[in-house]
Image: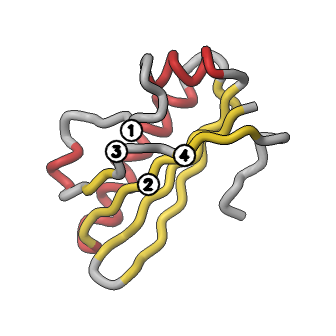
Amino acid sequence: MISRTWHGIVPIENKDTFYKYEYETGVKDALATKGNRGAYLSVVPQGSYAHFFLCTLWDDMAAVKLYAGENPTLAVTYPQDEKYGLISDPIVIMQKVNDNKNPFL
């Protein structure tokens, strides 16, 4: 199984609205993709920013590419991301994992 983790930050005042937006976009899109084994969202406030981590779990690289495209190490972005002041890491972390448990617990 493959774990794919994205990181981005938004101004702290946008934390709650971005959480809802990220759930409706990244989380739901991942969960709707064939070969997905889970999608977990974590938020870590730090000063004037909120850090968002989205970890998605996949059967194999073919499933990852169905969600992320042919360059699966690049972040998936959405047209309205800028509305929330999102600063997105352009690269995601991928690694092999043994189970589909929530990595943020």
CA neighbours of label 1 inside 10 A, class few (<14), some (14 to 19), many (20+): many
Find the distance from the CA under tag 3 to the CA under tag 2.
9 Å
Tag 2 or tag 3, which sits nearer the N-term? Answer: 2
Tell me the residue that label 3 is attached to. 90
Q: In the image, which is nearer the foreground, mark 4 or mark 2?
A: 4
Which residue is at the front of the view, 16 or 8?
Answer: 8
Mark 2 secondary-structure assignment: strand
User: What residue type is disc 1 on?
Assistant: Ala
User: What residue type is disc 3 on?
Assistant: Pro
Give above or below for 15 relative to 39.
Answer: below
Tell me the residue that label 1 is attached to. 75
Q: Which of the numbered marks, if any, corresponds to residue 93?
A: 4
Check contact, mark 4 vs mark 2: CB within 8 A: no
Find the distance from the CA under tag 4 to the CA under tag 3.
10 Å
Tag 2 or tag 1, which sits nearer the N-term? Answer: 2
In the picture, measured across the screen, residue 68 lies left or right of residue 100, that is left
Residue plotted at (25% across, 55% down): 86
Give above or below for 38 relative to 71.
Answer: below
Mark 4 secondary-structure assignment: strand
Q: Which of the numbered marks, if any, corresponds to residue 7?
A: 2
Residue plotted at (70% across, 55% down): 103
User: What residue type is disc 4 on?
Assistant: Ile
Which residue is at the front of the view, 33 or 74?
Answer: 74
Check contact, mark 3 vs mark 2: CB within 8 A: no
In the picture, measured across the screen, residue 5 lies left or right of residue 25, that is right
Check contact, mark 3 vs mark 1: CB within 8 A: yes
Colouring of the image? secondary structure
Find the distance from the CA under tag 3 to the CA under tag 1.
5 Å
